Image (cartoon, helix red, strand yellow):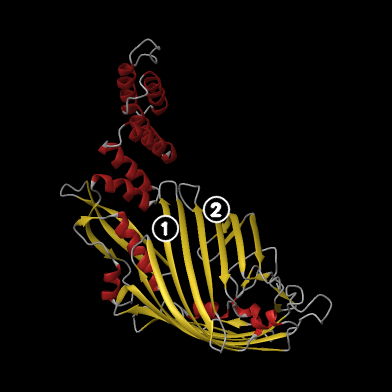
Amino acid sequence: MRLAPVSSPEQPAELDYYRGMALARLERWKEAKEAFESGRQKQPQDKRFPTELAGVAFKQQNFTEATAELRRALRLDSGDRYAVDFLATVYLLEGNVEAALDRWNRIEKPQIENVTIDPRPRVDPILLDRAFTFSPASVLNLADLRTTEARINALGIFPRYEFALSGRPDEKGEEGGKFDLVFRSTERNGWGSSTVAGLVSLLRGLPYLTVYPEWYNLKRSATNLQSLVRWDAEKRRLFATLSGPLERDPKWRYRVYVDGRKENWDISRTFFGNGFGSAAPVSDLKLEKLEAGAEIQSIESGRWSWKTGADLSHRRFGNFTPANSEATAFFTDGYALKYDAELDAHVLRDPERRITVDSTASGQLGKMLRHGADPFAKVEGTLGVHWLPQPQGDDYETSARVQAGQTFGQPPFDELFTLGLERDNDLWLRAHIGTRKGRKGAAPLGRNYVLANWDIDKKIYENGFLELKMGPFLDSGKIYDPSRDF
């Protein structure tokens, strides 16, 4: 078959469309694309041209261009079921199940015939079934999938898992638009899947004089025991926590914990409440603290969850007598009772652009259990952005987070915020090492703070066991205390 050259600007766009269709049937993709582009220039509001250009790009395995053209088509006609279905299919082939569901749900698809689990995990089948908020023979809703994933994550026994859509052939053996949903996972059981894996997990903190005894999925109930033993002479610690679902319901989860510390602090460069030059720097502050508590968490949906709890603690300080009464309040021995609550919510989840914005708000209310002590309170807020710029994989993964915290009243020293790089601290200001000669206290301390973190990770190497990433980061923060003692 011989076709006429590309039409001139005076010829109608309809001729370009039919010419492009004919060239596409002949798999002459470059010429077909030129014909459709010519027609689009003449009729930019005709959705057929971006739709067919998407088909050409799809045939050439250029999924990025195909999705861009389909979005253009849907901006012209958001109700075009063919374009919606086509775009969802492209996302599915790229492995972006959430984006596929986000589009499909607009046209009441996809229909799930069966939910299969391969391999079958050891966890209680009733517990796992209750974690799944969708059912066979129904439309798989994105909100239900996200709720399921949130509850699967909360079980704490699936370090890796995925939900995959598998096309289901119709009676003629062709793809009929229905799917099976397959849950594939790697499950934690006992102290590890093998002796080697168990030893690696146990001894991963050995360079820091720490071991991590852990036991997962006790009695197949997703009840997990995690602990930490550190014998560093400057910061000894013994920590253990037990968590599990309430009444075999993955929506609700309990946690009880105990934490004991015996630490030596060097606050000679961060504490100024002893007067300037009037007393020796505090380089050997001793802190002994024992804390026990319990909390309950509820995963309401894939969008938000909350938790609340209480703990009782006792602390004792040594090798230090403050020079003024205001500073003395920070270093008072005794018991304290504290209540805490936290709310986690997704502000934005855009699966097509692979952007998520998460937020956390938390508060604590406590009081030293001694005569004349006033209550204290702490509030914190976090806003985090996570972006995967590539259509597939996590290369150039970008994240940014802004946090702020404020304290009201007079907290004990061990309740102050710390900005710095230290293994027991989660407010990382990576340019500031949190220890000096192994002792805590080198990083900035205070009652109020603002912290921003930003980083980009480029994947350098990956195999089944090891992943190496490298990239720039930027941390900026400020911490301050109204008393000016820190």
Q: Which of 468 and 407 is in front in this view?
A: 407
Place of residue 300 in the rendered image (x, y in percent of width and height, measured from the top left)? 33, 66
Residue drawn at (74%, 84%) of the image: 284
Q: Mark 1 points at which residue?
A: 346
Q: Which amino acid does label 1 sit on?
A: His
Q: Is residue 61 above or below residue 94?
A: above
Q: Real-space Cα distance between discs 1 and 2?
A: 17 Å
Give the left or right position of residue 384, taking residue 143 as reference: right
Question: Is disc 1 in contact with disc 2, using a CB cutoff of under 8 Å?
Answer: no
Q: From where the camera sits, is residue 59 visible? A: no
**Residue positioned 26% across, 75% down in the render:** 126
Classify 390 as above or below 401. Answer: above
Residue depicted at 64% across the width and 72% down the height: 422
Position of the C terminus, as image quadrant, is bottom right
| Residue 72 drawn at (x, y percent) | 38, 33
Residue at disc 1, secondary structure: strand
N-terminal of the pair, mark 1 or mark 2, is 1
What amino acid type should be assigned to the residue bearing mark 2?
Thr
Quadrant in which the N terminus appears: top left
- The picture places residue 203, in percent across and down from the top left corner, at 57, 80
Q: In this view, does 247 lie above or below 44?
A: below
Q: Describe residue 371's horizontal placement relative to residue 215 as left or right.
A: right
Q: Residues within 10 Å of mark 1 (few under 14, many from 20)?
A: some
Q: Residue at x 29, y 78 (%)?
A: 248
Query: Which residue is label 2 attached to?
Result: 398
Report helix, strand or loop for mark 2.
strand
Nearest to the observer: residue 315 or residue 13: 315
The numbered disc on residue 160 is none
For residue 23, what is the image quadrant? top left
Camera sees residue 340 = yes
| Foreground label between 1 and 2 | 1
